[in-house]
Amino acid sequence: MSNKRIRIDRFYQFMTYSAASIAVIILSMIIIFVISNGSGLLNFGLVVNDYHAKFYNGGIDNNITFSQTERPESLTSEIYYSEKWGIGLIEEENREGNTIISVEYIDIDSPLRNMRDKNNDNNSLSLSEGSIVSSIKFYDKNSALTIHGAEHMINELDTSDDFREIVYSSLGGGVRGSIITTLYIIGLTLLIALPIGIFTAIYINEFAKKNRVTSLIRSMIEVLTGVPSIIFGLMGLAVFVPLTVKYTQADSANLLSGSLTLAVILLPIIIRSTEESLKVVPDDFRTASLALGANHTQTTFKVVLPSALPGIMTATLLAIGRIIGESAALIFAIGTAIKDDISIFGKSTTLSVHIWSLMTDEPANIELASTIAIIILIIVLVLNLIVKLIAKRFTKNFG
């Protein structure tokens, strides 16, 4: 081999290894950035809690029995404790980075465990660990607010025998609603897009005649794969939102209109991927099936389609990834309102739109956005494993 040929081969090898190394480094940097910024906020409460905090207004009776419990030794110096009221408060930051005062400890005999609901006299309220205390309003002095700090709030309680009202809430800031919305969108979109896309690909590859019309259809499908998703979002706003408002109980942008919009976006991907999977099935399979007496339709659905199933599952994985990562189209087709009560006929946000909403704040909440990104990665990984297990099971059954 000549020296020139050796130099060329080494250059190709260098370019190959360099490109692969750069790709791995870039992907690793993205993963490291997301994990390093978001892992601190990742916890079970973030996943199961609502985004909007629930507020309560509690009051006490005139004749109350104060706590008899001394300060527990387990409480750290950062926790301010009132022996009189049996409650320990601490200053923390919520998921948006704002200072809050939360209940770190509350005694069993604390009078704050048995309060009246000032919004409904028939209900009783119980302050619990993890609750966020916003303010304590007194009769004879100024209210103790979050801006004054936990120490001030405890001091005011210690010097008072009663108070007019205590306002507290749940933590909030959770992404439960966005997770449910994302799963709804994935299910509805695949339910619409997969059957249409797969059967369209079967028609084009197995039944349609090879002529200019078929070539035109393929060209149009390829053009649609390159159309920006925000254009589909405008179509969803102009077509699917009015359509769902007219024929369903929806009154504005909703999950169903978003799913229809995403289904249109995914159709070119599913059709092209499925068609390529059908093309790689050997013609010998078709010929053998026809020789054994099966007709064209039976051959297509009992021989060709099962053989192409792994490729179709790959198309499904690509579709799921596109659904979870899509935001531009959904801003128009669903809206940007973060909801806790989810309905397919109402507005809500997926996890990706939730990230967009956080990044539009001033300042942008990079930590929480990164945490949601980690949740997205976990969901994609779990769904990928599920789809691969299903594909393996079907392949074994048809094999």
Image (cartoon, grey):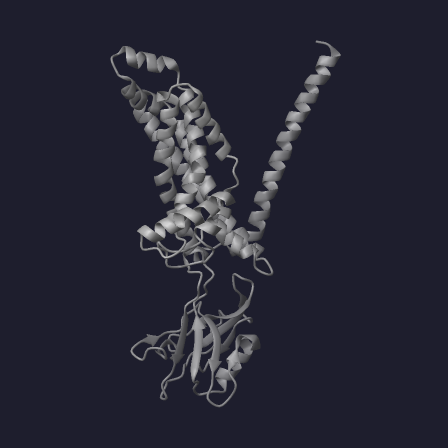
Furthest residue to the top? 1
Is 188 drawn above or below residue 42 in the view shown?
Answer: above
Is 205 drawn above or below residue 66 in the view shown?
Answer: above
Is 65 drawn above or below residue 1 in the view shown?
Answer: below
Quarter of the image with the N terminus is: top right
Quarter of the image with the C terminus is: top left
The reply to whether residue 315 is visible in this rendering is: yes
Furthest residue to the front? 212
Residue 151 screen position, x and y as percent: 55, 77
Of 248 and 31, which appears nearest the observer?
248
Left or right relative to 104: residue 2: right
Residue at position x 68%, y 25% in the image: 14
How many numbered discs? Answer: 0
Left or right relative to 126: residue 325: right
Residue 227 screen position, x and y as percent: 52, 38
Furthest residue to the right? 3
Residue at position x 46%, y 31% in the image: 221
The reply to whether residue 351 is visible in this rendering is: no
Residue 356 screen position, x and y as percent: 53, 52
Furthest residue to the left? 293
Of 123 and 342, which appears nearest the observer?
342
Residue 353 screen position, x and y as percent: 49, 51
Residue at position x 59%, y 61% in the image: 362
